[in-house]
Amino acid sequence: MNELLERYAKLETKMKLSCEKVSSELEIPFSKEFKKIADECRFDYLGRFEWFSFNNDGSHSVIGDTLRLRQEVNLPKDTLILAEDDASLLFMKCLGDREEIYWISTQDGYNYCDGQPLLNNPIIFSNFIDFFTYLLNEEEEMRQEEAPK
């Protein structure tokens, strides 16, 4: 894990997660690994995603959007919305000792909320460390491609 955090420290990002606030307000437990990464890292854009704010201070926040989707589409209480666009949804299913990260189509978002199978090639990470590793790899690759030659 320390290697991942060192790699992350080399990337410039801007927003500090307020993990305890999110956990408390949404009554969602986070794993030790997620809390450690959240304590060390700031998210804004990382990898392909424009992350929702963990500080509930923008037009989109993990708290506000998670609560909205709980009301609108019966999002399960153990699920945290991380990002959303016109075609896909990124969320974290919190299992206490670990998280599963889902990157799915909007249609599969409805399927997930209805307890139906995910049909549109979902990408599922079995824990946050695997997902974070993927994000770091993507971010480093994008920055190398953008670097002047």
Image: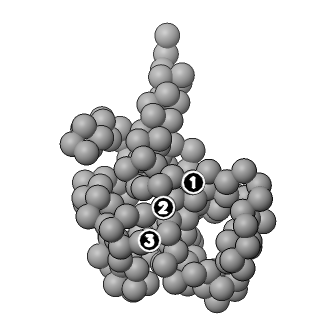
Q: Residue at x 49, y 10 (%)?
A: 149
Query: Looking at the picture, how far across and down is residue 53, in whole percent?
Result: 46, 66
8 to the left or right of 103 = left
Judged from the image, the secondary structure of the residue bearing numbered disc 2 is strand
Q: Report the disc number at residue 73.
A: none
Residue sitting at the far bottom = 71
Q: Earlier in the sequence, mark 3 or mark 1?
A: 3
The answer to whether residue 92 is above or below residue 65 is: above
Q: Are marks 1 and 2 in contact (CB under 8 Å)?
A: yes
The answer to whether residue 21 is above or below residue 142 is: below
Residue at which label 3 appears: 94
**Distance CA(mark 3)–CA(mark 1):** 13 Å
**Type of residue at label 3?**
Cys
Judged from the image, the secondary structure of the residue bearing numbered disc 1 is strand
Residue at which label 1 appears: 124
Q: Residue at x 47, y 43 (%)?
A: 135
Q: Report the disc number at residue 100.
A: 2
Q: Residue at x 30, y 36 (%)?
A: 7
Image quarter where the N terminus lies is top left
Residue closest to the eye, 41 or 127 = 127
Query: Does the rendering let one see residue 16?
Result: no
**Distance CA(mark 1)–CA(mark 2):** 7 Å
Q: Earlier in the sequence, mark 2 or mark 3?
A: 3
